[in-house]
Image (spheres, rainbow, N blue to C red):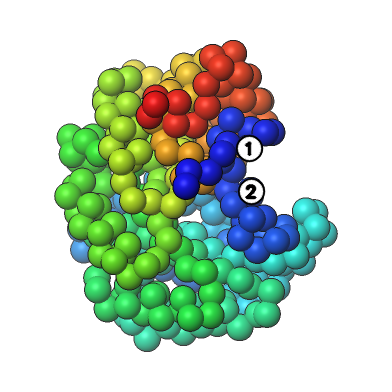
Amino acid sequence: MERMISQTKRYYQFSEYLKERFGCKVYKVTIDAGFTCPNRDGKLGWGGCTYCNNLGFSANSRHEPLPIREQIEQGMAFMRKRYKAEKFIAYFQAYTNTYAPIETLRANYSAALEFDDIVALSIGTRPDCAPDPVLDLIGSYQASHEVWVEYGLQSIHDRTLRLVNRGHNYATFLDALERTRRRGLKVCVHVILGLPGESHAEMMATAQAVGQMDIDSLKIHLMHVLRDTPIEKDLTEGRFKALEFDEYVNLVCDFLEYLPPKVSIQRLTADGPRSILLAPKWATQKSKIIAAIDAELERRGSQQGSRLG
């Protein structure tokens, strides 16, 4: 049976899912395990995706990572104090968290799950870094914890993926998704709105494709330009123009309308650090963006899944 959208939001918040699943406040504790990426170390390419400066995605990456246990202890203490959190998800966030030998991965994942208050494991990675032995290892933790794999798709369009130097195509993502779901693992997909050269129609094609996938959750990111990334040059030389505020709000609402109500929403925008954010400057106003999305859905009289009938 399809779930009903919340009375407080017109989309299914991940926090609501966690409350339903665990019966209390559950928050992610982000972990930087010191991994790299095949798109940065020369295996597939150098420099990473054209928009990637990991300082903009992981607070832990802004300094030399502490041992995993210390990161989790500090993260849980902060979340308890600030948000009254009771339980936690160990979230391996920085770079590609399946890109290492199996024994290294096992040691890192197991260390994160030694805490009684960790109820779930979430692993951020790339679809081209999910071989079967790694998925089997990740799947083995389901006996004791809820287990998620977060895949960066970004777009279904291979032309766009080549343009931003992703290093994989859409078919690779679909293969990884099928093998991950076959093991019963939960999947969160990441997409980016406003990628270079993409039209509204192309972004909505991604929305429709994602809406038909067998996934559990979604993160929608705003394409923003950070300092010391390849796309910085495209911005300064006029080859790339960031989305306007109202344009982005409408895109997110359009996207949500193609998603089944059962897919929880973990993120609706991106908020890079002010110190390295070049464009759009309004990207730092996260609460304003989310309020505008809520207001636009209300104005339309629509909600997540509206275009699915």
Rendering coords of residue 207 (x, y %): 34, 33
Q: Is residue 19 above or below residue 285?
A: below
Q: Which structural element holds mark 1?
A: loop
Farthest front residue?
Answer: 1
* Residue drawn at x 46%, y 76% as measured from the top left: 142
Task: Note whether 273 is above or below 87 in the view shown.
Answer: above
Q: Mark 2 — residue?
A: 16
Q: Which mark is residue 6?
A: 1
- The residue type indicated by label 2 comes to Glu
Above or below for 189 versus 32:
above
Judging depth in this view, the residue of 72 and 118 nearest the camera is 118
Given contact means CB atoms under 8 Å apart, are the residues at marks 1 and 2 in contact?
Answer: yes
Tell me where residue 168 appears, x and y as whole percent.
Answer: 21, 51
Count of residue discs: 2
Q: Position of residue 45 (x, y in %)?
A: 22, 55
Quick check: 234 left or right of 144?
left
Q: Is residue 174 left or right of residue 69?
A: left
Q: Please identify the quarter of the rendering in which residue 23 is found.
A: bottom right
Q: Nearer the viewer, residue 200 or 272?
A: 200
Q: Label 1 to label 2, Cα distance in Å?
A: 8 Å
Q: Amino acid at mark 1?
A: Ser
- At which x and y percent is residue 97? 41, 66
Under circle 2, the secondary element is helix
| Quadrant in the rendering for residue 274 | top right
